[in-house]
Image (tube, coloured by chain):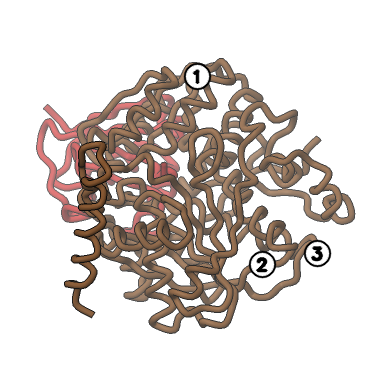
Amino acid sequence: MSYVNGLKCKECGAKYSHRGVHVCELCFGPLEVEYDYAAMQGKVTKASIQAGPHSLWRYRDLLPCDGEPKAGLNSGMTPLRRAHNLERVLGVKELYIKDDSANYPTWSYKERVVSVAITKAIELGYDTVGCASTGNLANSVAAHAAVAGLKAFVMIPHDLELGKVLGSLIFHPTMVRINGNYDDVNRLCSEIADKYRWAIVNVNLRPYYTEGAKTYGFEIAEQLGWRLPQHTVCPTAGGTILPKIYKAYQEFIGLGLVADNQPRIYSAQAAGCNPVIEALEAGRDLIRPQKPRTIAKSIAIGNPADGYYVLQTLRQCGGWGASVSDDEIVEAIKLLAKTEGIWTEPAGGTTLAATIKLIESCRIPRDESICVCITGNGLKTVEVVQNHLETPAVIQPRLEAFDQVMQNMTAASVAAPV
Amino acid sequence: MAIKVRIPTPLRNITEGVDLVETTGANVAEVLAQITAKFAGLDKRLFKQPGELNRFVNIYVNDEDIRFLDNLATPVKDGDEVSIVPAIAGG
């Protein structure tokens, strides 16, 4: 049972039946899943959702799968945390963290898109899945494919963090590291998808894959007590998640599950790879591709396929965006850890640092509700912070040695400038 | 020698299943003009209007996106490979 009507091109409006096409055959535009919202009225309710499993599949009526879920049965429903300590530091009234660094089983938002894509791949009869990835997606595809008994091919740039590489290899996929950046990997995967009959989740399963990202927005709304934050800040790489959070909010509004408080969404990018923010600030529709130079490798996509739709969403809802330096990213990672006990990867640092900028520049008012989207886990990217943390003392296992450490600490704090 | 143009799957129903076309031209615009003249209907798939590619059509000369080069005026020579690649999602 599903409410899916079919697929529609976001650019030219051409319609396709519900099958494995992934780009419009007329103009190459991305295809969007269309649902029969009228048929959902009165059937997709708070009660029907709450009666579902404690996973992202509680929103299956709003996802494009026909049969039973085949992947991600324990994914999603990550914590939405009130961040009181961060509120005090930033001087804001109501701040939440949606924490996908705790998403199961590979600790990123990608479980959402992969759960839907792999379920769809099985429905469409594929026995092999793959992806072009900056790391997190590869981790998730490899893990979910292992559970589902599918063969997996994951393609990544050659220079990813060790945690991201091992975080895939442990699940025994076929990994290919490509000499080039993500955009080169992306292009290669587009050609691989042409030649091999595989379900490359972010290429030929893209219309279904991207729908999974809506569950991030659905969860924010439900966990906030069936209401929407007024301001949601999220990272932009390829541009999948931001328009889909907005779509999720609008679907809940349309179904009468939440009040329409005119929610605004904001995009965060690293200064070393900010093609969307650059176009936003210049007032342009055209996104100029960039060669990424940033520590935020998971969002280092210089040629974002859905970047145009990020811009369109920002302009439609009255949101905005900010880009931040690598130093600001590291500082924000440390701030989130020491205030809220969450260790995020650079994408999360980017989002928090951009939130701070948007608050300080009065783009986001201090007295309204704000949700910061943390989409990945810092344990995978230890390299980024290893030279930015204190060096612990190494001592002999004797009390006098420990006392000496305490004396040194006291002396240091006395000596420290006030 | 000639210039090779790679045709992606979504366009092969127009190119009668052909995935590699050999053609000539001094720059990308001329190469694309050659192949759009050869296959009826291809022009509208690639171009929004004359001189303006559809938003989701990416063109590469060898390994470089033409937006890093000189867009449609990017020069090409014998042996170069021009690829037409649909934009895809992030990872």
Image side of residue A329 versus residue A25, left or right: left
Residue B5 % position (x, y):
26, 34
Q: CA distance from mark 3 to mark 2?
A: 12 Å
- Residue A228 - label: 2
Residue to which mark 1 is pinned: A128
Query: Neighbour class for label 1 at 10 Å: few (<14), some, many (≥20)?
Result: some
Circles 2 and 1 on the same chain? yes
Q: Of helix, strand and loop, which one carries label 2? A: loop
Q: Quadrant of the C terminus of chain A?
A: bottom left
Residue to which mark 3 is pinned: A256
Q: Of helix, strand and loop, which one carries label 3? A: loop
The chain coloured red in the image: B
Which comes sooner in the sequence, label 2 or label 1?
1
Image side of residue A301 versus residue A293, left or right: right
The chain coloured brown in the image: A
Residue B85 placement: quadrant: top left
Q: Nearer the viewer, residue A128 or B2?
A: A128
Which comes sooner in the sequence, label 3 or label 1?
1
Q: Is residue A410 above or below residue A177?
A: below
At a point 21% along the width and 45% down the height, the residue shown is A401
Circles 3 and 2 on the same chain? yes
Image side of residue A418 versus residue A57, left or right: left
Q: Nearer the viewer, residue B73 or A258?
A: A258
Q: Of helix, strand and loop, which one carries label 1? A: strand
Residue B23 % position (x, y):
22, 34
Residue A136 % position (x, y):
42, 38
